[in-house]
Amino acid sequence: MWTRRWIALAIAWAVCMAGWLVVAMVPNSYESKARIFVQIDDVLADQIGIGGDRKRDIERVRQTLTSSVNLEKVIRATRLGDKVTDDKQMQAAVAGLGKNVKVVSQQDNLFEITGYAGGGGRNDGENAKLAQDVVQKMIDIFREENLAGGRGEMTDTLAFMDQQLASRKKDLEAAELKRTEFEAKNVGFIPGIGSISTKLEAARGQLRDVESNLLAAQSALASINGQLSGTPQTIAVAGPAGGAKGALAQAQSDLGSMRARGLTDSHPDVIAVKGQIAGLQKAAAGEGGAGGTLNPAYSSLISIKADREASIVALQSRKGSLQAEIAQLSAQQFSEPTVAAEAARISRDYDVYKEQYDKLLRDREQLRLRGQVETERDAVKFEVIDPPTMPTGPSAPDRPLLLMLVLVVGVGAGGAGAFALAQLKSAYSTTGQLERSTGLPVLGGVS
């Protein structure tokens, strides 16, 4: 390789010159940075329970700053838009600017905005000023989107929620009217108090009570009949004092008093007295002229028997009435499941509309109150900590590093070229090297 050192040096110089020329032609890029502070905590809003998630709102604004709409605003407001004449060029400019702007959240409330500018047929001074202008416009957009835009957005949101509330209110009123009309039309068929199932169960319970009372009354009547069979109708007395005729007269007087009070023949007391009168009439007809008088115990048992018989008649009548009512309710019960299912569906619809309306109303009131608080007090306090810097020197490319890399590449290329030539065209500086390389004896050499 040493014999080809001049070739290696030539290759190295050629590569270095070409590389250094390329490095010299790379346009300078200028960088401008700014830091902003955004205070998103509002004590009043937090205390009254309406504090919104402003961190999420700031993050949303941070992301939308690099959207196509906002980048187009930056282009139109700076020299980037000087050569843009149609939509295709605007799209290309937006794509290029998207790679040259960056918004970084350093802390919860601190943001760094960085803009780059270079090339484009502009000189270094113009690119430095353009980088500063881009960052300044980004700050302006941040302020507009987060402060002015936020209040406009709240107004639009309130208007939209008012629209939704009006629509939900109509749906709720329609559902309430439908439920009311259905309940009025199907009263007694809907499960709950007053439904057919409830009435049927109550009627069956009453029937069980009546049957139990009827059995007790029949048992008591049988006991009275047994006592009557062993009790004499009359007892011997010294003279005709009272007797069945006197008791009959008293019973007839009692019956007249009851009718005078307005009691009908179906009243249990009237039925009992009439039964007592019938028994006394039989006793008076069989009463002797001078041998005895009606036995008071027998007369009392007759009265009790008449009362028991009247109770049995009333209970049997009540039993028949309940049985007829149960039969009627049982026939109507077949239509109740369908009605109950429809009632449940209508009730569910109403509950859904009511829940949606109440939630919308709460959200709307909370949003309105938050809007009032933000009108009186800025919920977001915006401050520029470090204004956009005016670059004093290019941020890229790093020319010393690139020049050094080109030099390393040139030296490497020269060495590689010399080595390759040495492998292709071998030469020996001494006869000993030739003898060792070929393994043959060397007879002599020409110097």
Image: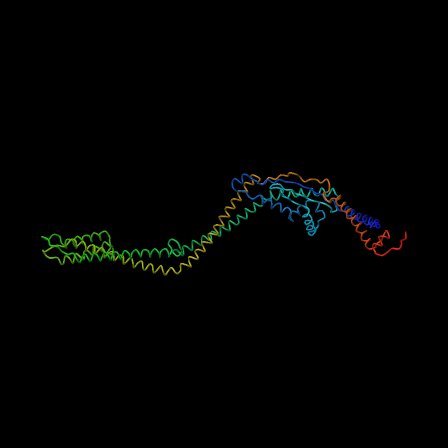
Left or right position of 226 against 368: left
Give the percent coordinates (x, y) of residue 86. 70, 51
Is 328 located above or below residue 33 in the figure?
A: below
Give the percent coordinates (x, y) of residue 114. 67, 43
Residue at left offset 73%, top offset 41%: 393
Residue at left offset 69%, top offset 40%: 389
Q: Nearer the viewer, residue 353 or 409?
A: 409
Residue at left offset 80%, top offset 52%: 419
Residue closest to the far right: 446
Is 227 located above or below residue 153 in the figure?
A: below
Give the percent coordinates (x, y) of residue 122. 74, 45
Is 170 located above or below residue 379 in the figure?
A: below
Give the percent coordinates (x, y) of residue 125. 74, 42
Left or right position of 309 against 178: left
Colour scheme shown: rainbow
Determine which quarter of the picture holds residue 141. Answer: top right
Q: Nearer the viewer, residue 10 or 336?
A: 10
Query: How many numbered badges does the structure rendering display?
Result: 0
Left or right position of 442 against 330: right
